[in-house]
Amino acid sequence: MTLPGADENVLLKVEAIKKYFPVRGGFFQRVRGRIKAVDGVDLEIQKGKTLGLVGESGCGKSTVARLILKLLEPDSGRILYNQKEITRLTERQMRPIRREMQIIFQDPMGALNPRMTVGSVLQEGLMVLGLENKKRRERVAQLLYLVGLPDEAARMYPHEFSGGQRQRIGIARALSVEPSLLVCDEPISALDVSIQAQIINLLKELQERLSLSYLFISHDLNVVGYLCDWCAVMYLGQVMEYGSTDMIFERHMHPYTKALLASVPAREPGKGLPIPLEGDVPSPLNPPPGCRFQGRCPMVEERCRKHEIDLHEAGECHLVRCWKV
Ligand SMILES: Nc1ncnc2c1ncn2[C@@H]1O[C@H](COP(=O)(O)OP(=O)(O)OP(=O)(O)O)[C@@H](O)[C@H]1O
Ligand SMILES: [Mg+2]
């Protein structure tokens, strides 16, 4: 895949990664089928930039995130971090790189130990960096300031905070080990709309201040349009369209992207009702041959049902996986 930008500007590159989950059944627990959760995905995250990953529920976004973070082993394909292949590194070899990539979850409570004060949670990360006591305390104060929490927060427990504040703690915890890449998997979907905007702005501010790269997974296309430089649209384990955010939002070509964007509620009232995407996402268990979107595509043709098509160039900074483009 060729997207612009010299390789030295690329922090993370994913090439043709696949992850199939076996489905077992019957008396002997034989493999009855495979869920093709991620089926040949290519992505690039540039230094200091944000790549948005969008698509309906179950299309494989979180699986891509877990593959990138090496929480899951891909069946095939390559992952390169700073131009170095990390696909098959051992746990020990991976350790210094693991620190560089942190994740922010939808529900930060799940990732925070309820019996530890916020100060101790943050200190844990700082111990990994080998900082001495005094330095650690200073750094905790700095981290809290960075994410907009008061000093007193260090002595409090996670349950004493609101949802938005907890997400700030989650972000501070991720930042404590000085990462280069933050994988944000639906970081705002559990929050109130007003709080969502604060967290998005915080992420934007932190990116500028600390030159962070983000993989931003979200259902909210408005937020993706605002925050992301690049955008990949996934459907049933594959990337259907990929390009600069402007290209995806203004000059998209794939019928799925069109349908997805048409289903976004208009920001200005009175500008029309969202058009729902018809039908459910089919199961990624043994998907049919040909294009994954064939069953819901208004432009479907015979060749779409028979033959798969690769992601191909459709213009500058723009890749599409469709027979008609
Ligand atoms: N450990 C697993 N074992 C079996 N199937 C899995 C596993 N993890 C994910 N899947 C399946 O893989 C597919 C992709 O799941 P994934 O969680 O990546 O989707 P997603 O795009 O993140 O969805 P959502 O928007 O709902 O978070 C789904 O069909 C899911 O059921
Ligand atoms: Mg998910």
Image (cartoon, rainbow, N blue to C red):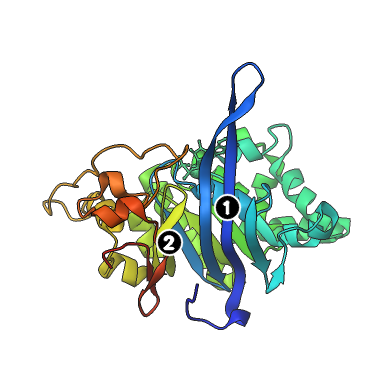
Question: Is residue 245 toward the left or the right of residue 151 in the image?
Answer: left
Q: Quadrant of residue 82?
A: bottom right
Is any atom of residue 148 visible in this view? no
Q: Depth check: 199 or 211 in front?
A: 211
The amino acid type found where label 2 is placed reads: Ala
Nearer-N-terminus badge (2/1): 1
Residue found 22% across the figure and 53% down from its top: 262
Q: Disc count in the image?
A: 2
Q: In the displayed structure, does residue 300 sit left or right of residue 30?
A: left
- Residue bearing the label numbered 2: 232
Rendered image quadrant of residue 83: bottom right
Which SS class for mark 1? Answer: strand
In this view, the residue in front, 242 or 262, is 242
Residue 164 x %, y %: 50, 45
Residue 117 location (% of width, % of height): 72, 39
Mark 1 residue's CB less than 8 Å from ligand 1: no
User: Which residue is under mark 1?
Assistant: 18
Mark 2 or mark 1, which is nearer to you?
1
